[in-house]
Amino acid sequence: MKAFHSFRLDSVNQCVWRGDERVTLTPKAFDVLRYLVEHPGRLVTHEEILEALWPKAYVNQEVVKKYILAIRKALQDEHHRPVFIETLPRRGYQFLAQVTDEAPVASTALSEIAEKRIVGRDGALAALEGLVDKALGGRRQIVFVTGEPGIGKTALVDAFQHRSARRPNMRIARGQCVEGFGGKEAYYPMLEALGQLARGDGGGSVVQALATRAPTWLIQFPSLVKASQREALQREILGATRERMLREICETLESLTAADSLILMFEDLHWADPSTLDVLSALARRRDPARLAVVATYRPLDVVLSGSPLKGLKRDLKLHGLCEEIALERLVIADVGAYLATNFAAGLPAGFTALVHRHSSGNPLFMVALLQDMQKKGWIARDNGTWKLMAPLGRIDPGVPENLQQMLDAQFDQLSAPEQQLLSIASVAGERFSAALISSSLDLVSDRVEDLCETLAERRQFIRAATTDGATGAALTAHYEFTHALYREGVYRQLSAVTRSRLHRRIAEQLLLRRPVTGGPELAAELARHFEFGHDNARAIDYLMKVAENVRGRFAYRESIRVLQHALELVPSIPSDVAFGLECRIHELIGDAYYVLGAMADSARSYEAAASHASEAGLQAAQVSALSALVRPLGLIDPDRGIAVVDRVVRVSDGLDDPLLAARTRLLAAATRLFYDKWRDEDAVLCAAAYKDLGRLSADDRPSYHQMLYAHVLALMGQYDEAIAIFDQALLRIDESSSLMVHFFALSGKTMALLRCGRFGELLAIIRDGKQEAAKNGNDPWLFNFREAWPRVLLFDFEGARALCEAMLTSGAEYPTGQSETIARVSEGYAALGRGDTRRAIKCFEEIADPRSTRKFFLHWTWRLVAQLGLTDAWLAWANPDNARGSCDLLLANALATPDPLFRALAWETKARVAMASQNWEQAREDVARALSALEGFAVPVAAWQVHATACKLHAHAGDRGTAEAHRDAAKRHIEAIADSLVADEPLRASFLSALSVRTVLGRSAVDR
Ligand SMILES: Nc1ncnc2c1ncn2[C@@H]1O[C@H](COP(=O)(O)OP(=O)(O)O)[C@@H](O)[C@H]1O
Ligand SMILES: [Mg+2]
């Protein structure tokens, strides 16, 4: 704190102290003084001051003179014998006094003053202090301070904050909830409080804690993230959810209380967004020790009227003993007496106390306003240093307005016309406003507006100077705030509907002019509100969509849906030429949010709505976009409908002259049919052609979703290296534009390719990381469970695969159950086969092989092939060669209808075994040769070792030991490659190596390896 002479400059409270006495200055005068104090002992020119304090406005030098005058008056400096400020004529000023830096004194004086102003709250203050003591012992405390507007909630928590600030090792941060849609932005008050902690004393450790424990929160503060950390952070938060955000903030706050205690204060929680309430709820319910107190104020009646979830939350917390409530009561007559005694000395008669109490009914805000009014009317006045009643009580009594609102209205009526005009526009701007914004909206020169604001603030009426955020600095423009929300509401209510909407529009336009288009998140919400109330719904919708995007960045998908639904409500009132397009886009965004939430049916419904609006309006490009999106949820819940939809997409997009779009839709359509229906060569050809077009037409160097569809097709055709290269390239870079869905699609596709080429170690690593990430995010790892089931089957862990799938079946999540049912049944079949329960095995495999008994899902046909393989094996085990032959013929026909070398080779190999079982050696030799040639040109060790093992048996039977051994060696090499792709202690490695058929190849010695 800068000190000079007997004065101290208090930048936090924007005032000057002389000892314990507060010397009040208007905000601009304070800024001028601060500037001089910060540049002492030299000439400071008029221009310099203007440049520093009014950088963007045209301000007359005379204004500076006026402030210097005010400062001199406040410091009692004399113009001709100055001690502090010397005027250097026509040039400027010089600050004369010696300036020293003083540590901010444990501001007793300050807090005493704050506490002195409040009366009748000793009990409440003691209760709050008691709760903080408990919190200091490690037992977290959640306290609600409740009561009607003006009852003194803010005054109480202010006083409490001042007291608590004196405690050692204490951090305090505050977040304010705001009325209206702006306030509904997810986590707004929490982010505000966190920002204070990060910028305050010891902020470095807060940033550090965020970096290690709460990346989802750190990313909300772009200025705290170094450019070099950004990509790692983006990767870290991919797929984050609401649950994760909640957990991370709780853990971070708790970790901060290891070294210091923490008090979080949330003001006006009746206006809070649901996410902020979730934070509160989570903080209250966690059990770990934390030296944390949360103090939150709210108006109970507003909570009931708005239907805020706070009502239920409070009830529930109270029921479980997880929160305390301090309900503030009206002041009693003795409190009013105490107030008058402190503020008006002892000069006022006893009857006067009763009068003030009766009229204000003990509401402090009413009381303060009443006394101001009386001073203004001259009923009470200072006479020779003491306060006196200037009129008989009997005359005062009838003149007092009946209720608080009338009181405030009456005060408003007494103001000058320019003051009223200024307050009117300020009431539209909001609780807090900048003088510059008002002046540009009023077309008044800014110093005139500041003048008006300062006079009002000086009279402590309606508004007061607001402390500006340290980051933006006071130099930009003076800020003011309404002394109480009821003042703003009162003024606002007096405006006619027409005026309101005109002023809202005006303010919105000024906000747009004054700040960059990419203004902070709060700006979007503010603009949306002003445009909506200004009846410019087109622009309101625009900004609501931006709000939804911001909220999405906080993983608050449900809230983004709510914002978008609100935007939809505004659509009917805008011109239809834009309305249709917007409506489609909004429905599509809602569909995206539902998709991320895993609500596939809702997602499909929203995309469907988008598509049908687009089709009605003849917006074909929008229709293509919506229908293409629709395929994604349908693939999971109703593949047949998905297949029908892609045909529609192609028809619509063919009607447009857009080659890139046409290539995309053709790829999507063909790949969807391949994945969800069955393999057709002509679709594969279509995919390849479209893929080539895409490479030619699109500018992005990263593979798109569509290009990855093709990579899947490549993997099915045995082109693993090429497919993996595409997936890897997609996984390489992660930034804001990376889509979660595309990322997962790449991972999933890569596991499919890795499996076929026997790289199980890498495959399992992807699955393990994916599951860890899902656990961190609180997501269902269903995709990774599916991708884990098949390697388990191939490595002979049938029991593991079955358990995995059964667990998924019972979890009740909304994912494709057909897939888990199928894999569970196939695994069960193999397990039964291993046990010798062949009858059971046959039943399981038959069920899956029959498309009528299990539904379609992503690549369902590959599983039907696996089942047919199993069924043939089961018939062989049953010693029923006829049935085995029948089943194998079907298997072969189906496998040969696909290009997949895995199934083609295994189908021939199985056929050879069927032939061997019937002693048909000639046939078997032919089949083995076919199996070997199916492998040619492909690296599919999972099929190759089996083919060579059978070849070995066949040649051994024929007595050709040399060839038999060569095949055994080949089989061994493939088995070893598979085993070596797994780390030594991976249980699946042991499972594979101890399987009977594998042991047979390796010989006895291998069992002990
Ligand atoms: N206990 C009190 N003693 C004296 N004045 C008070 C007290 N509580 C509130 N006030 C005055 O009443 C006004 C309204 O109180 P405030 O705390 O803003 O109400 P709330 O937050 O409950 O709406 C404050 O500006 C303050 O001047
Ligand atoms: Mg308040």
Image (spheres, rainbow, N blue to C red):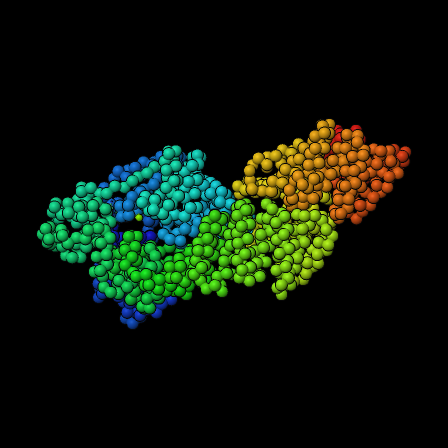
The percent position of residue 219, horizontal first and vertical second, equals: 49, 50
Query: What residue appears at the point 30 percent right and 69 percent down from the top-left corner?
Result: 61
Left or right side of 944 for 332 = left
The percent position of residue 644, horizontal first and vertical second, equals: 63, 52
Left or right side of 213 for 928 = right
Can residue 559 be seen in the rendering of this structure?
yes
The percent position of residue 345, horizontal first and vertical second, equals: 16, 48
Q: Looking at the image, is 599 positioned above or below residue 425?
A: above
- Farthest residue in the bottom direction? 90
Q: Nearer the viewer, residue 465 or 245?
A: 245
The percent position of residue 417, horizontal first and vertical second, equals: 24, 65
Q: Nearer the viewer, residue 827 or 949?
A: 827
Q: Nearer the viewer, residue 184 or 78?
A: 184
Left or right side of 395 for 907 = right
Rendered image quadrant of residue 892: top right
What is the number of callouts on the image? Answer: 0
Q: Nearer the viewer, residue 53 or 512?
A: 512
In the rendered view of the protein, which quadrant contains the C terminus?
top right
- Farthest residue in the right direction? 959
Query: What residue appears at the point 58 percent right and 48 percent down from the top-left corner?
Result: 633
Query: What residue appears at the point 51 percent right and 52 percent down from the top-left corner?
Result: 590
Can residue 93 be seen in the rendering of this structure?
no
Q: Looking at the image, is 228 positioned above or below residue 787?
A: below
Query: What residue appears at the point 13 percent right and 52 percent down from the top-left corner?
Result: 398
